[in-house]
Image (tube, grey):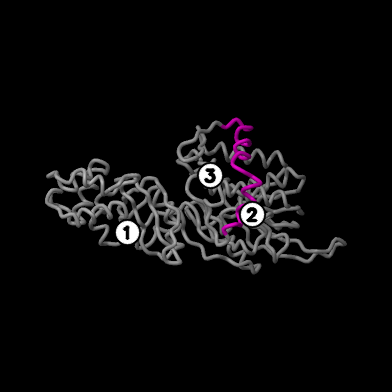
Amino acid sequence: MDFDVIVVGAGAAGMMCAAVAGQRGRRVLLVEHSTKLGEKIRISGGGRCNFTNVHTKPEAFLSRNAAFCRSALARYTPRDFITLVERHAITYHEKTLGQLFCNESATQIIAMLKHECDAANVHWAIPAAVERVKQIVRSDPDGGTHFEVVTSQGSFRARSVVIATGGLSIPKIGASPFGYRIAEQFGVPIVAPKPALVPLAATPEWLAQFGDLSGTSFDTIASCTGRPVGEHFPAFRESALVTHRGLSGPAILQVSSYWQLGSGGAVTLDLMPERDAGAWLAAHRSENRSPGALLEEFLPRRFAQSFAKAHGWTQPLAQLSNATLEVIAQTLKAWRIHPSGTLGYSKAEVTLGGVDTDALSQKTMESRAVPGLYFIGEVVDVTGWLGGYNFQWAWSSGHAAGLAL
């Protein structure tokens, strides 16, 4: 069978691309190795799919080429996707920080995308494992090249192939390095992938002091320092969570991506967001309470006590020197933690790195060196913040390729 376009991967980016190309009159085949569509959509947002973020901006994305995402994001915005959601009568709400969730179920987004593909006469091959992709020189009068995609359901040919197979995060739902293998096969460079938006593992020494606080959360501003030395990445004001293996929670997931891009040094936590720690301690200078008891005013009790004990702050405030109080204030505003690593792809929300954006057109997502070969979504070296940004990249990049096919 011959098609104009074969899209490999029926996730967020793949279904968006297939629907847009089909709506433009292209004959599209969508190939998916799983028996289910959009599994990452289904499990996202606690089953309600954080499908976009109204504050989406290029600065919220990490890539070796920071400007690459601008074109696609500008041409298909959160408002555009919200309009699609509203057209399908899917009700939604804003949770925090611009994050939009379905009121009912993430399966509504999957059904919406499936409906858009069906309405555009997209053909399906599911489940169909892709065995190989090869480029063939055409012998017809038009000349040029096309691609043959050999699958467990047979061989298919098309003028263009779009790789939308995602990254390595959450392997239990079928993540694989397939997209990277195809890129390498055709000589398209790869930025080494890493788990992103992922919990951080702590050292045995840190766990000995705080590991028994697993399940305890606290408000913080998380940040880290990268290369060159002294360059600070964005700071994130959200909650952190102590786990039996280290730290998690939104603030930690956010900063984990930057920590890996940086020197791999310390993550810094401000335990008194928007407060002057020195002034606060000075106001309680004459009290006989211990620092741990005082910290219970804004930190969970067990965490406050363990934090003070770990730093040796056991005497009443009235007995502490001014120098010690200054150290306490500095530590509360910049608690430095040296993670031992991450918890890996099984716990990661997305993948950092991927197909090198310098090898792609930022307008169309097409390979510069291999005409007709496109890469979209998570497989590309564009990684967003937590909170709907990565889904927006899927919609935007898929739409950009769909318009170009």
Q: Could you tell me residue 360's position as x and y percent?
A: 65, 61
Q: Residue furthest right?
A: 141
Q: Which mark is drawn over residue 8? A: 2
Which-is-in-front pick, marks 1 and 3?
1
Q: Tell whether 111 sits left or right of 212.
A: right
In front of the other: 145 or 155: 145
Q: In this figure, which residue is indicated by the disc labeled 3?
A: 41
Q: Is residue 271 found inside the magenta-colored segment of the image?
A: no
Check whether the beta carbons of the residues at disc 3 and disc 2 lie within 8 A of each other: no
Which-is-in-front pick, marks 3 and 2?
3
Q: Is residue 76 found inside the magenta-colored segment of the image?
A: yes
How much space separates mark 3 and mark 2, taking CA atoms? 17 Å
Q: Which of the 4 image quadrants contains residue 142?
A: bottom right
Q: Could you tell me residue 198's position as x and y percent?
A: 42, 54
Instruction: Give the mark count.
Output: 3
How much space separates mark 2 and mark 1, taking CA atoms? 41 Å
Task: Give the vertical position of 251 relative to 139 (above or below).
Answer: above
Q: Secondary structure at mark 1?
A: strand
Q: Tell whether 81 sits left or right of 228.
A: right
How much space separates mark 1 and mark 3, taking CA atoms? 33 Å
Check whether the beta carbons of the residues at disc 2 and disc 1 lie within 8 A of each other: no
Q: Which mark is drawn over residue 337? A: 1
Q: Which mark is drawn over residue 398? A: none
Task: Give the vertical position of 280 relative to 134 (above or below).
Answer: above
- Type of amino acid at the residue the image marks with label 1: Ile
Task: Give the vertical position of 247 relative to 147 (above or below).
Answer: above
Residue visible at 83% across and 65% down? 139
Which-is-in-front pick, marks 2 and 1?
1
Q: Could you tell me residue 403's position as x and y percent?
A: 72, 49
Q: Secondary structure at mark 3?
A: helix
Q: Magenta residues, as a range? A: 66-90
- Type of amino acid at the residue the image marks with label 2: Val
